[in-house]
Image: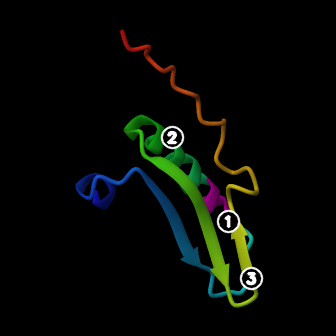
Protein backbone atom coordinates (compact mmCIF):
# COMPACT_ATOMS: atom_id res chain seq x y z
CA UNK A 1 0.00 0.00 0.00
CA UNK A 2 2.78 2.48 0.92
CA UNK A 3 4.66 1.71 -2.30
CA UNK A 4 1.65 2.61 -4.43
CA UNK A 5 0.63 5.61 -2.33
CA UNK A 6 4.14 7.07 -2.45
CA UNK A 7 4.60 6.21 -6.15
CA UNK A 8 7.72 4.13 -5.42
CA UNK A 9 9.83 2.83 -8.29
CA UNK A 10 11.72 0.29 -6.14
CA UNK A 11 11.90 -1.13 -2.62
CA UNK A 12 14.01 -3.21 -0.22
CA UNK A 13 12.47 -5.44 2.43
CA UNK A 14 14.45 -5.94 5.65
CA UNK A 15 13.72 -7.66 8.94
CA UNK A 16 15.63 -9.14 11.84
CA UNK A 17 16.05 -12.64 13.21
CA UNK A 18 16.47 -12.27 16.99
CA UNK A 19 17.87 -15.82 17.12
CA UNK A 20 21.12 -14.53 15.60
CA UNK A 21 20.82 -16.94 12.65
CA UNK A 22 20.66 -14.96 9.41
CA UNK A 23 19.64 -17.91 7.24
CA UNK A 24 16.20 -17.46 5.64
CA UNK A 25 13.35 -19.67 6.81
CA UNK A 26 11.00 -21.39 4.36
CA UNK A 27 8.45 -18.67 5.19
CA UNK A 28 11.03 -15.94 4.36
CA UNK A 29 11.71 -17.53 0.97
CA UNK A 30 8.02 -18.03 0.17
CA UNK A 31 7.20 -14.42 1.09
CA UNK A 32 10.13 -13.17 -1.00
CA UNK A 33 8.96 -15.11 -4.05
CA UNK A 34 5.37 -13.91 -3.63
CA UNK A 35 6.48 -10.28 -3.27
CA UNK A 36 8.81 -10.64 -6.25
CA UNK A 37 5.96 -11.88 -8.47
CA UNK A 38 3.71 -9.09 -7.22
CA UNK A 39 6.44 -6.50 -7.85
CA UNK A 40 6.68 -7.66 -11.47
CA UNK A 41 2.93 -7.21 -11.95
CA UNK A 42 3.01 -3.77 -10.31
CA UNK A 43 6.19 -2.74 -12.16
CA UNK A 44 7.91 -1.75 -8.89
CA UNK A 45 11.45 -3.12 -8.70
CA UNK A 46 12.11 -5.40 -5.71
CA UNK A 47 15.79 -4.72 -5.04
CA UNK A 48 16.45 -7.11 -2.14
CA UNK A 49 15.16 -8.82 0.98
CA UNK A 50 17.71 -8.60 3.77
CA UNK A 51 17.72 -10.52 7.06
CA UNK A 52 19.66 -8.74 9.81
CA UNK A 53 21.12 -10.23 13.00
CA UNK A 54 23.72 -9.26 15.58
CA UNK A 55 26.05 -11.71 13.80
CA UNK A 56 25.64 -10.36 10.27
CA UNK A 57 23.10 -10.39 7.47
CA UNK A 58 21.90 -12.41 4.48
CA UNK A 59 20.69 -11.04 1.17
CA UNK A 60 17.99 -13.22 -0.34
CA UNK A 61 18.82 -11.75 -3.74
CA UNK A 62 22.42 -12.95 -3.38
CA UNK A 63 21.05 -16.37 -2.36
CA UNK A 64 18.95 -16.46 -5.56
CA UNK A 65 15.67 -16.75 -3.64
CA UNK A 66 13.71 -14.41 -5.94
CA UNK A 67 12.71 -16.99 -8.51
CA UNK A 68 13.09 -16.37 -12.24
CA UNK A 69 15.00 -13.35 -13.47
CA UNK A 70 13.08 -10.18 -14.18
CA UNK A 71 11.96 -10.13 -17.82
CA UNK A 72 13.24 -7.21 -19.86
CA UNK A 73 10.54 -4.98 -21.26
CA UNK A 74 10.73 -4.16 -24.94
CA UNK A 75 11.20 -0.50 -25.67
CA UNK A 76 8.76 1.02 -28.12
CA UNK A 77 10.49 2.97 -30.82
CA UNK A 78 9.24 6.52 -31.07
CA UNK A 79 8.20 7.78 -34.48
Q: Is residue 71 above or below residue 66?
A: above
Quadrant in which the C terminus is drawn:
top left
- Is residue 32 one of those drawn in magenta? no
Query: Where is residue 16 shown, x and y percent of the image?
Result: 58, 80
Residue at the spot of label 2: 37
Residues at badges 1 and 2 in contact (C-beta under 8 Å)?
no
Mark 3 crowd level (few <14, some 14–19, many ≥20, 10 Å Cα): few
In the image, 45 versus 66, the foreground residue is: 45
Q: Foreground mark, 2 or 3? A: 3
Residue 1 location, quadrant: bottom left
In the image, 78 versus 54, the foreground residue is: 78
Earlier-in-chain disc, 1 versus 2: 1
Query: Where is residue 48 shown, x and y percent of the image?
Result: 59, 59
Region in magenta: 24-29
- Which mark identifies residue 56? 3
Mark 2 crowd level (few <14, some 14–19, many ≥20, 10 Å Cα): some
Residue depicted at 72% across the width and 86% down the height: 20
Residue at the spot of label 1: 25
Amino acid sequence: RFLIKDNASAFILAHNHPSGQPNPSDADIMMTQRLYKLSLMMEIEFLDHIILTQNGYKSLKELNCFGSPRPRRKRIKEI
